[in-house]
Image (cartoon, rainbow, N blue to C red):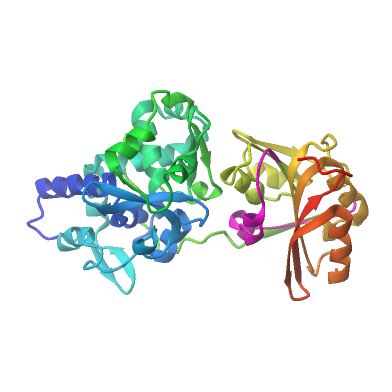
Amino acid sequence: MVSEDLSVVSLNELGEYLDEVIKRFYGAGRLLLLPALLNMRSVDCELLGRLCCDGSSLTINYRVGDFVSVIKASLGSLSRNMVPCIMDIRRMPPLSRFVNAGVIRVSGGSLIVNYWDDYEGLLNASGMAKNVLIALQSLVKCRAYTVGMLAKCANLDAGDLYEALLTARLLYPALLELVMPSGYTVNSMLGRLGVGALIRVGELMSMLGTTEYERVVIVPSPLINELAIRVVDGGWGIPKPSLHRFRAGRVSSRANVGDGVVSVRSGVTRYSIPAMLDLVRFRGVVADIGCGFGVKGTYGLRRGASYVILLDIDEYVLRLRRSGWAVDRVVADARMLPLRDSSIDVAIVWNVVNFIRERERALGEVRRVCRGDVVYSIYNAANAHWLYGYEDFLNDILSLGKPLAIRRGGNAQFQAVVRVLHGEHKD
């Protein structure tokens, strides 16, 4: 335990101080909740980056007085409008109070929980921390996609639940997005303020507030399933943490061989967001063809798409990825897509075609259903049906339409964004 003179009253005071740290969106708040989210005694900036910083979203951080500033969800310097992570109590002063109490220590670039029982007591003494953890744990358990549905499933007040989810979104934007009844997302509302904008916390929360809590849509990312939170009897508690480190994906794979199709899945692909996707103007309906775990397709929802269809011939892997608001799963063959002509605004065909014997037929289906952009990638895997040269790749993308961007990774990986042409482009 912590020092003998740390009384229940002082632990409660620490909990109240943690409430203030979270409510004012100090950078230290993100670090202090991280051990609870991942069930780990030792956390660092790399782990924080995986949960908070997808590089494409906006969030906020305490700046001065009652003001927060809009920042990019990328690790870096607050002076450059990025998420700060500094394992130094002199440069992140709110940490010092918890260090001096003996609950945590900062050493070797990591924040380390000294005594797990006291850390658990601290979080139970903080209403904000406990509510955020219960909200996220309920989201994992209930798999509901509106605040109203989640409140009923978890037997929670919808208003309190919305406040906790909004706080979680602002602390860890890579975990989830919220869509208001008006259709605006938290990200788009912050974007209207602009990176670097200063705003009082109360004004911001009022701007992001709504009286229609139940209708707010929750869009979780796949990372939500990697959280290790445990809620016990309305309180918060988790088993003593193990020494394993959180990883972006489990190292596992499976392969199926079917008629003309080889399906290869790796756990690492669950969280792989290629930089090429950031060159696409996502809108309308996105089809992720040969989607695997569906991460690339659902990424489109965070970038402006309205609806996503995940298509894969592997029913098992589709079952691992749940459906939800604006996301449908369809078991389908890339050579016979169950989609209408010119019905798709963005098609993602990522490392699929070189595993299909009838390549031209698959590409013809992509041309038939897509009226906008195609994100196309090929790599020379040993278990593909053929080795695929750069000239083959160029011929394929030119058969689709007009290349907007091309990226070549030696002789192993070729990627492109292509504008499909149907006589006149339909846009």
Q: At 42% across and 30% down in the image, what residue appears?
A: 154
Q: Please state the horizontal and vertical placement of residue 394, each as a whole percent of the image.
A: 85, 65
Who is closer to the viewer here, 310 or 208? 208
The answer to which quarter of the image holds residue 386 is bottom right
Q: Is residue 51 above or below residue 165?
A: below
Residue lying furthest left in this view?
A: 5
**Magenta segment boundaries in residue numbering:** 259-285
Residue visible at 23% across and 60% down?
95
Q: Is residue 325 above or below residue 303?
A: above
Residue 282 place in picture, x, y as percent: 65, 46
> Does the stretch in magenta take in 72?
no
Task: Place residue 96 in its image quadrant.
Answer: bottom left
Residue 275 lies, with reference to residue 180, above or below; the image says: below
Q: Nearer the viewer, residue 236 or 394?
A: 394
Magenta residue check for 266: yes
415 sits left or right of 29 in the view = right
Give the quarter of the figure containing the C terminus.
top right
Q: Position of residue 148 (x, y in %)?
A: 46, 25
Question: Can you tell which quarter of the image residue 322 is in?
Answer: top right
**Is 1 on the left-hand or right-hand side of 306?**
left
Q: Residue at x 68, y 38 (%)?
A: 284
Residue 116 can be seen in this image? yes
Q: Report the quarter where the N terminus lies.
A: bottom left
